[in-house]
Structures are given as C-alpha cells and as structure tokens.
Amino acid sequence: MFTHSTDQLHALLSELHEQSETQLLARARKQFPGSDAEFLSLARRYNDLAPRLRGKFLREHGLSSEDSDASQGTELSLSVSAQMGNFLRNMVLTHRPQRILELGSSYGVSTLYFADALNRLGNGTVVATELDPVKCTRINEHVSAMGLANQVELKAGDVFKTIAALDGVFDFVFIDIWASGYLDAFKNIERLLRPGSIVLADNMFTAEDAVKPFKHYVDNNPAFSSTTLDFESGVEFTVVL
Ligand SMILES: C[S@@+](CC[C@H](N)C(=O)[O-])C[C@H]1O[C@@H](n2cnc3c(N)ncnc32)[C@H](O)[C@@H]1O
C-alpha cells in the first residue's frame, strides 16, 4: 500500500496552512476600513501580542475572531496552525490513543496530523466529522493523496447526528467546530469517554465569549480536570477522572 513520504506530507500541509492564512488575512483586510499601511501595522501588532489577548484585540478593531459561529464563512479553511498541528501530533504520539474523535475537520488539516501520528504508531483510527460536503471532498482527496485512508473514517453531516450514532470508547477528542456548540458537543460525547481520555478544545482565546459556558462546565464538574493552555488560539486541555 502507498504511504506518503514525510516530504510529501510536509509540502501538502505547508500549502494548506498558507491557504488558510491567506484566506484569514483577506477576510480581515475586507473588514478593516483603514489604509493598507494601517492594516499592515495592525497585523504586526497582532502578531506581537500574547495569544490570550488576540481575540479581544480583533474584536476591538471590528474584525472577526475565528470560529465562533457559522456566520464566519463556511467556505474558509480555518485550519489549525503548523504549531498547533505539531502539538496535536505529539499528543497522539505520547498518549497513543486507539480511537480519536475530531469534531470539525474542514479541509482535513488537523485530520492529517492525527492520521500521520497514528500511521507512525502502526494502529488507531481518527473519526473525522464535517458538515460541508465540499470540505468533505477535500478531506478525502488529501487523506487519499497521502496514503492515510486506513487511519481516517470520515463522517459527513451534522456533528450532533454523527455523535448520536457513535458507540464505543474514544481515548482522545479534538473539538474544533463553531465555538457556540462546544458545550452541547462536550455533553454529547461524555458517554463515549473513559477515565484518562483527553479532550482538547481549540479557540478558547479567539472565541472567548462563545466558549464561556463550556469552560464553566469543565471547570466546575468534579468528573474532569481541566486547564487552558496559553498556546496558539488557546487550548482547553481536559482529562476525564
Ligand atoms: C475551525 S474549522 C475546523 C478546522 C480543522 N480542525 C482543521 O484544523 O483543519 C470548523 C469546521 O467545523 C465545521 N462545523 C461547524 N459546525 C459543525 C456541525 N454542527 N457539524 C459538522 N461540522 C461542523 C465547519 O464546517 C468547519 O469546517
């Protein structure tokens, strides 16, 4: 069976990261009423900010902070960054999950990091979920092109319907749908977790307001130990006790 080379995967991921960043920059430029020079200066200030201040900064300047709801633009990739992708891959390599559930797969960037890690470990599956049919086609193309189809099970359609039909145990979950749905999604997956299962939720800083009910729930529920990592878009790291 064909398996990707590290170089091929790296090249595809670089292209997909660049595409996502270009889309986000174009969206921000469209939303920003000032001159190009002012926009450039704003972008530099944004890059210099600590991650936890970025969502607030964008909102203060009338720019969308990522991933809070569907009005963000369904066609956008909104993929994890390369740093976040490498973190996800390392988490899998060290936790060695048999089954991963990914909520919100978009073009399949985070899916590729998960599948690559599982392929290196020699077993395990990631169940990828995505509502948008065009994005589902892209996921399939990317996964097949890298020879990682054996590691990925794509479930097209609404994530809540997908979750309701799942059974068995998941050792690792990544939540990256619209942030207004985090709490409902989390409550729906609780029955699929075991002690020691890890749930990572992205965009805790960039979608700070929308994720508050979820954050409050995991912080105040004795069944979980949870902390927000001050990294990239803000990552909630929850372990089932
Ligand atoms: C931030 S993007 C995911 C990015 C992806 N994890 C990556 O790194 O490439 C969020 C995705 O979740 C999908 N999504 C949002 N709500 C959903 C739902 N209820 N069911 C299925 N997919 C959903 C969106 O279509 C979008 O593609």
Image (tube, grey):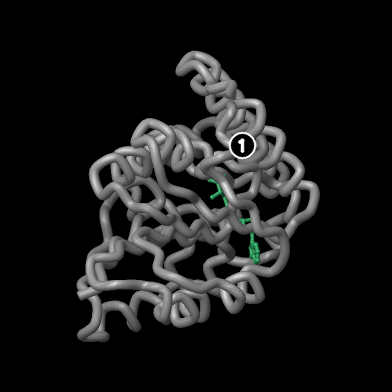
Instruction: Measuring from the top left, give residue 235's x and y in whole percent.
Output: 35, 56
Q: Tell whether 25 sits left or right of 191.
A: right
Vertical side of 93 occupied by 178: above or below: below
Horizontal arrangement in the rendering, residue 74 relative to residue 54 (left or right): right
Q: Residue at x 54, y 27 (%)?
A: 13
Q: How many marks?
A: 1
Quadrant containing the N terminus in the rendered view: top right
Q: Residue furthest right?
A: 134
Q: Badge 1: few (under 14), some or many (20 or more) residues near its Cα, within 10 Å?
A: many
Residue at image location 56% in from the left, 43% down from the top: 79
Of the 4 image quadrants, the one containing the C terminus is bottom left
- The answer to whether residue 45 of the structure is visible from this angle is no
- State whether residue 93 appears in this view: yes
Residue drawn 30% across the image and 72% down it: 194
Residue 18 image position (x, y, % from top left): 58, 27
Quarter of the rendered structure image containing ligand 1 = bottom right
The residue nearer to you, when weighing 116 against 159, is: 116
Q: Which residue is mark 1?
A: 20
The kind of residue on which mark 1 rests is Ser
107 up-or-down from 156: above or below: above
The residue located at (56%, 34%) in the rendering is: 148
- Above or below 241: residue 140: above
Q: Position of residue 180 (x, y in %)?
A: 55, 73
Which percent across, then down, holds residue 97?
Answer: 33, 52
**Residue 49 horizontal side relative to residue 137, left or right:** left
**Label 1 CB sits under 8 Å from any ligand 1 atom:** yes
**Quadrant in which residue 68 is drawn:** bottom right
For label 1, the SS is helix
